[in-house]
C-alpha cells in the first residue's frame, strides 16, 4: 500500500495544537523545577532561565533557549490552528498556503524533545548535589512535547493540500 487516507487528521492536528498552546501557558506560568541545596531553595521557570542566561553572560544561549523552547512551539501550534481550523468549514484563512509551507519548513526547528532530553540528563547529574523536584511547568512541558509530536505526526499532507486547494476555489 502506497497511501492510506487518515480520516479526521485535521481535527486531531487542531486539537493537539490547541492543547499545546494551553500547556504552553501552564509552562510559562508555573515553576519548571525546584532545587534545595545547602538550605537554599531555588525555583526556576523557562522564562527566568532564559533571562538569567542572557544577564549572566550567555546571551546566545539564552536567546536560543527562548526561541526553540518557548517561541517555536507557540508559533508552530498557532500556525497549525490557523491553517487547519478554517478548513472544517471548507474555507482557507488568508495566506494559509504560505503558512503551511513555512510550517513544513520549520518543523525540524521545533526543539522541544531535544531540550527535554538535555534537561533530564542535567537533572540526573544535579540530583547528586541537590534535591531536585519537578514543578508543574516540567510536567506541562513533557505533555507539550507529546502534543507537539502528535500534532506533527497527525498531519496528513495529502488531505491538507487537497483541502487547501478546494477551499481556495
Image (tube, helix red, strand yellow):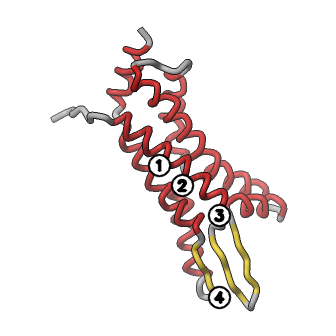
Q: Give the number of the disc on residue 30.
A: 3
CA gap, disc 3 to disc 2? 17 Å
Rate crowding at label 4 as few (under 14), some (14 to 19) or many (20 or more) other CA atoms within 10 Å: few
Q: Name which of mark 2 and mark 4 comes first in the sequence.
A: 2
**Secondary structure under badge 2?**
helix
Q: Are marks 1 and 3 in contact (CB under 8 Å)?
A: no
CA gap, disc 1 to disc 2? 8 Å
Rate crowding at label 3 as few (under 14), some (14 to 19) or many (20 or more) other CA atoms within 10 Å: some
- Report the label total: 4
For label 2, the residue is 112
| Residue drawn at 21 percent across, 34 percent down | 4
Q: Name which of mark 3 and mark 2 comes first in the sequence.
A: 3
CA gap, disc 2 to disc 4? 26 Å
| Residue drawn at 72 percent across, 63 percent down | 49
Q: Are marks 4 and 3 in contact (CB under 8 Å)?
A: no
**Secondary structure under badge 3?**
loop
Rate crowding at label 2 as few (under 14), some (14 to 19) or many (20 or more) other CA atoms within 10 Å: many
Mark whose residue sits in front, 1 or 4? 1
For label 4, the residue is 129
Q: Give the number of the disc on residue 121.
A: none
Mark whose residue sits in front, 1 or 2? 1
CA gap, disc 1 to disc 3? 19 Å
Rate crowding at label 1 as few (under 14), some (14 to 19) or many (20 or more) other CA atoms within 10 Å: many
Q: Name which of mark 1 and mark 3 comes first in the sequence.
A: 3
Q: Are marks 1 and 2 in contact (CB under 8 Å)?
A: yes
| Residue drawn at 73 percent across, 57 percent down | 62
For label 1, the residue is 148
List x then y, in percent, for residue 44. Answer: 70, 69
Mark whose residue sits in front, 3 or 2? 3
Q: Name which of mark 4 and mark 3 comes first in the sequence.
A: 3
Q: From the viewer's perspective, is residue 97 above or below residue 48? A: above
Q: From the viewer's perspective, is residue 29 above or below residue 123? A: above
Amino acid at each position: 500500500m502506497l497511501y492510506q487516507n487518515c480520516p479526521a487528521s485535521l481535527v486531531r492536528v487542531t486539537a493537539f495544537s490547541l492543547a499545546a498552546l494551553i500547556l504552553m501557558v501552564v509552562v510559562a506560568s508555573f515553576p519548571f523545577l525546584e532545587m534545595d541545596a545547602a538550605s537554599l531553595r531555588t525555583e526556576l521557570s523557562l522564562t527566568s532561565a532564559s533571562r538569567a542566561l542572557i544577564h549572566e553572560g550567555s546571551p546566545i544561549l539564552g536567546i536560543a533557549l527562548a526561541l526553540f523552547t518557548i517561541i517555536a512551539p507557540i508559533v508552530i501550534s498557532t500556525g497549525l490552528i490557523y491553517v487547519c481550523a478554517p478548513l472544517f468549514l471548507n474555507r482557507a484563512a488568508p495566506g494559509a498556503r504560505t503558512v503551511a509551507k513555512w510550517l513544513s519548513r520549520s518543523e525540524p526547528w521545533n526543539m522541544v524533545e531535544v531540550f527535554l532530553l538535555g534537561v533530564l540528563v542535567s537533572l540526573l547529574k544535579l540530583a547528586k548535589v541537590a534535591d531536585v523536584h519537578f514543578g508543574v511547568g516540567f510536567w506541562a512541558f513533557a505533555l507539550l512535547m507529546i502534543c507537539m509530536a502528535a500534532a506533527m505526526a497527525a498531519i496528513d499532507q495529502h488531505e491538507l493540500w487537497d483541502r487547501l486547494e478546494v477551499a481556495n476555489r
